[in-house]
Image: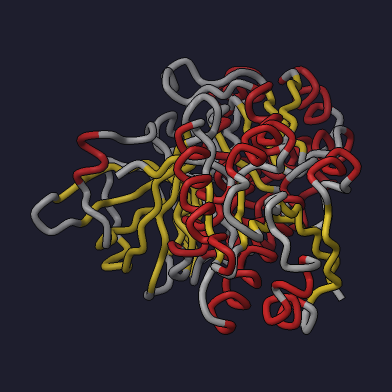
Amino acid sequence: MTHLNLITFASELNKQGTIRHAHRQLFDLLETRYDVHIVSPDAIEALERNELQLVFISSGGVEYQFRNYYEQLPKPVVLLTDGLQNSLAASLEISTWTRRQGTACRIIHGNEETVLAELTEYEQLFAKRHLLAGKRIGVIGEPSKWLIASSVNHTEARRRWGIEFVDISLDEVESNFNAIGDDEVRHPAEQFVANATAMREPKIADVIKAYRLYRAIKAVCQRHNLDAFTIQCFGLIPRIGTTGCLALSLLNDDGIVAGCEGDMQTVFTMLAVKTVVGCDGFMCNPSQIDARANSLLLAHCTIGLKQTQAYIVRNHFESLSGVAVQGTLPDGDYTLVKCGGNALDEYFVSSAQLLQNTDFNDVCRTQVRLHLDESCDYFFQNPLGNHHVLIRGNHAQALSRFFELNQAHRIS
């Protein structure tokens, strides 16, 4: 049974017996699912942060007491109240004050079905938050110079999300690449080509070189114990004569979240999405937007093969070198998402439907046209940078609740 800590605020004027007795119906409900522990605010510091915990407002008249302990409370603040003894009124006052401090605050209140449903969702999101904490994201090389709005304050990211960004030199990748022989990767390279619908620009020698890079980056990830990484892919081209597109595709299939161009915000988004809803993400550029139809074209030169129905072996669009993937995505519902801001404290999310896989010559290789359920005005008025992340399925509500729980502000 899950351990639930209720950090409990009760008025000194409350003379109606013990807290459990006064709120017997609520505690009977909670104890059908949880091992419930009433915790005094004085004992907050002793709590294990990975244990499920929320704030129980058991009566009115506790607002000042709450404010005194605010800094020590887990953030964001989640309030549980059954409404007895003016507890809902106090919760509303506390919620308003908390949000004015810049901290997200959620109130769990209602009938038994509602309370259990909201607690179940909170428990799941709380667990995902702690799964994300401690993850390591490698930054291999430097962010691309054109990403002037996509940097991340490492200290703020660690404070908010518990993640760590690790700086790694491109020299390490190049050294690994040079130590790998063609024969070591020839068979999987040939199998990759055999499974493709077609191969257009590259030759088998190009694919073998791309597979050597895949092995080289994977060794870096293993050495540094990375859960995810983003790489200065354009910086690799003059060094080793190939691009990272195929390597990133294969590494995403291996379960290592991989992004390009040194974009830290987008690779964090991909990692968060995978942690919360279990989906691999397609890191992509909005390339065309039709505001009247509320549709957009997304494109990029790398996508995990597992996300596609079929793929064509191509070269990299901008450099016309290396090996890229032109994937065909299945029909159905999708979600477009981005967590951005220097402190990773802003997000956009929208459900969408795939309209068409396209094959234009003047954009990156994997291309999909989507109908967006949220307004495309977001991209014209207040976008969170260039790259966004596309995942299969409608996960907009789950992702919204997760980002809101972690004090991220929705952009629309």
**Residue drawn at the location 51% of the way across and 20% of the way down:** 144
Position in image of residue 21 (x %, y %): 77, 75
Position in image of residue 60 (x %, y %): 57, 54
Q: Is residue 388 toward the left or the right of residue 41 in the image?
A: left
Position in image of residue 205 (x %, y %): 64, 42
**Residue drawn at the location 63% of the way across and 25% of the way down:** 156
**Which colour scheme appears in the figure?**
secondary structure
Q: Place residue 255 in its image quadrant.
A: bottom right
Q: Quadrant of the N terminus?
A: bottom right
Residue situated in front as seen by the camera: 388 or 7? 7
Residue 334 sits above or below residue 163 on the image: below
**Residue drawn at the location 72% of the way across and 72% of the way down:** 22
Q: Is residue 292 toward the left or the right of residue 212 in the image?
A: left
Residue situated in front as seen by the camera: 26 or 300? 26
**Residue drawn at the location 83% of the way across and 29% of the way down:** 176
Q: Is residue 223 toward the left or the right of residue 317 in the image?
A: right
Position in image of residue 187 (x %, y %): 77, 57
Residue 128 seen in the figure: no
